[in-house]
Amino acid sequence: MDRKESWLIKMELKNNEEVNRHNRSLRETFRQLVEHKYFQPIVIGIILLNGLIIVTETYLTGNSLLIAIDKIIVWIFVIELIIKLIGLGFRGYFLDRWNIFDFSIVVASLVFYSTPFVSVLRLIRVLRLIRMIPAIPALRKIIDSLMKSIPALTGILGLSILLFSIYAIIGTTFFSDVLPYEFFGSFHTALFTLMQVVTFESWASQVARPIINEVPWAWVYFVSFIIIGALVILNLVVAVILSYLGQDDDAKREEQMERLYKENQELKQDIQEIKEMLMERNNRVNQ
C-alpha cells in the first residue's frame, strides 16, 4: 500500500467518524427535545385541540377552516413522530407499545386523508384522542394495569359465562310463557335480559315484578342472581383490577428499598475501610 492509498483511507475514516459524531449529536439534540418538560404538555394541548376541532365539526360540517386546521394538526403529529424516531432511535421507539399505537394512528391518518373513505377517516380522527392515554402518566398507568389484569380476569369471565348460562336456561324454562318473547323467549334473549338485570336498569318494574305476579317464587331467582352476579362477581373484577393497580407502586417501592439497601451496604464498606486505614496509621505512629 503506497502513501497515497494510506492517506485516502485515513481521510475516509476521518469523514466517517465526523458523520457518526454529527449523527450522535443530532440524535442527542432530538432526545433532549423529546425529554424536555414542555414537550409532552404541548402534545397534550394539540390532542385536546384536535378533539375540539372534531366536536366543532359536528355542528359545522364541511367548514373549510376546520378542515385546514385538522390537516395542520395531522402534519404536526407527523413532525412529532419524526422527532421521536430520531431522538429515541427505531429500536428505542418501537420498544414501547404505546409508540406503536401512535405510529399506526398517524400513518393511518395520512393514508386515509386522500381516500374517499370518509367514515374510516372520521374513525381515525376520533382514535387520535386515544393518544391522550400514553401522554398522561395516570391514564397510562390505569390502562397498563387493566391489560396486565386480563389473564387473571379470564377465570372470573368463565365463571360469569357459566352463571349467566345457568340462569338463562332456568329463565327460558320457567318464564318463557309469562313475558313476551324478547325477555325469556330464547337463550340469547334471556342472556340479554339478565344483562339488563345485572345493570339494575328497569329490571324490577319491567322484568321482575310482572314475573313475580305470575310465579311467586321468582323473587328467589332474581335476588340470588343479583347477589351472585352483580354484587359478588363484579366486586371480584374490581378487586383484581385494584390489586394490579397497586402492584406497580409496590414494585417501585421495593426497587427503591433495594437501591437504598445497596447504598447503605456500600457506605458501611467505605466506613470499614476508613477505620482500617486509621487503625493502620495509628499502629505505624505507635511503632
Image (cartoon, rainbow, N blue to C red):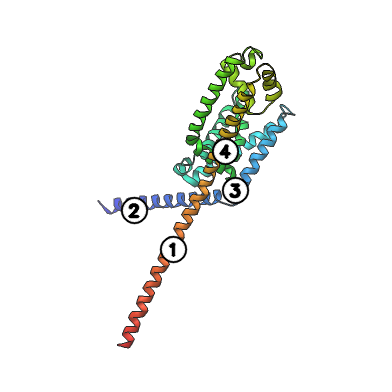
Residue 170 image point, x, y percent:
56, 19
Q: Is label 1 in a helix, a strand or a loop?
A: helix
Closer to the chain start, of discs 3 and 2, is: 2
Q: Which mark is residue 10?
A: 2
Give the residue at mark 1: 263
Tell whether label 2 touches label 1 (CB within 8 Å): no
Residue located at (59% from left, 45% from top): 138
Q: Residue farthest to the right?
A: 59
* Amino acid at the residue labelled 1: Glu
Given residues 236 and 113, the one toward you in this image is: 236
Q: What's the CA distance linking mark 1 and mark 2? A: 47 Å
Ranked by sequence position, the earlier of labels 4 and 1 is 4
CA separation, marks 3 and 1? 33 Å
Residue 286 versus residue 268 in the image, above or below: below
What is the CA distance from the residue labelled 3 to the residue labelled 4? Answer: 35 Å
Give the camera-side residue of 244 and 99. Answer: 244
Q: Position of residue 268 (x, y in %)?
A: 41, 68
* Amino acid under disc 3: Phe
Amino acid on which disc 2 is placed: Lys
Image depth: mark 3 or mark 4 in front = 4
Point 47% across, 35% down: residue: 151
Q: Secondary structure at mark 4?
A: helix
Q: Nearer the viewer, mark 3 or mark 2?
A: 3
* 60 shown above or below 100: above
Q: CA distance from mark 2 to mark 4?
A: 66 Å
Q: Are marks 3 and 2 in contact (CB under 8 Å)?
A: no
Between the residue at mark 4 and the residue at mark 1, the CA separation in whole angstroms equals 38 Å
Marking on residue 238: 4
Please say if 198 is above or below 213. Answer: below
Q: Mark 2 or mark 4: which comes first in sequence?
A: 2
- Report which residue position mark 3 lands on: 39
Tell me if residue 3 can be seen.
yes
